[in-house]
Amino acid sequence: MRIRRLSLLQGSHEARGTTVIIDVFRAFTCEPLLFYYGASQIILEADIEKCRSLQGDYLRIGESNEIPIEGFDLTNSPSLILAKGRDYFAGKRIIHRSTSGVGGAVNAFAHADEVLLASFINAAATRATSKAAARTW
């Protein structure tokens, strides 16, 4: 097994094989919280205009260079997700956009065989998943 440590959006373009995208502070802390609070689907999308153009009953969550995006329902904030709670997210479909974490994941999806989204909140589960994947190589 060959392990490469790549950084930032540039590194995500070079991702191959099983790839772990780590965004420890916000983006990939949001995903586990959203699913915990009952979100039915999360779509990762890096392009702001595509987020806006997707039709259907979605909550749009995201930021652009750490600035809230006009017209989105919520910024990329685990603390705001916690404050809104289960009633706000239960059964909802989410479009999530962030500059680094989601942007990197979307880039990696184009080239990697498998993409795992990691943060402090799901580090143990990511480690267990990546070890299981490593045993199959």
Image (cartoon, helix red, strand yellow):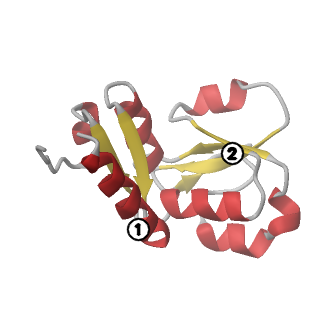
Q: Position of residue 34 (x, y in %)?
A: 68, 59
Is 130 displayed left or right of 81 in the figure?
left
Could you tell me if residue 93 is visible in this image?
yes
Q: Is residue 111 above or below residue 93?
A: above
Q: What amino acid does circle 2 point to?
A: Glu
Q: Which residue appears at 33% of the width and 47% of the height?
A: 133
Is 41 displayed left or right of 121 in the figure?
right
Numbered circle sitting on residue 123: 1
Q: Looking at the figure, which quarter contains the N terminus?
A: top left
Is 37 displayed left or right of 110 in the figure?
right
The image quadrant that residue 109 belongs to is top left
Numbered circle sitting on residue 110: none
Tag 1–tag 2 contact (CB < 8 Å): no
- Label 2's element? loop
Q: Position of residue 84 (x, y in %)?
A: 79, 69
Query: Mark 1 or mark 2, which has the lower sequence index?
Result: 2
- Label 1's element? helix
Residue at the extreme front: 136
Could you tell me if residue 23 is visible in this image?
no
Q: What amino acid does circle 1 point to?
A: Ala
Q: Position of residue 49 (x, y in %)?
A: 61, 27
To which residue does mark 2 refer? 70
Q: Which residue appears at 76% of the width and 47% of the height?
A: 40
Considering depth in this image, is 4 or 107 the residue closer to the camera? 4
User: How far is the residue under mark 1 from the one under mark 2?
Assistant: 32 Å
Q: Which residue appears at 70% of the width and 73% of the height?
A: 82
Q: Looking at the figure, which quarter contains the C terminus?
A: top left
Q: Residues within 10 Å of mark 2 (few under 14, many from 20)?
A: few
The image quadrant that residue 41 belongs to is top right
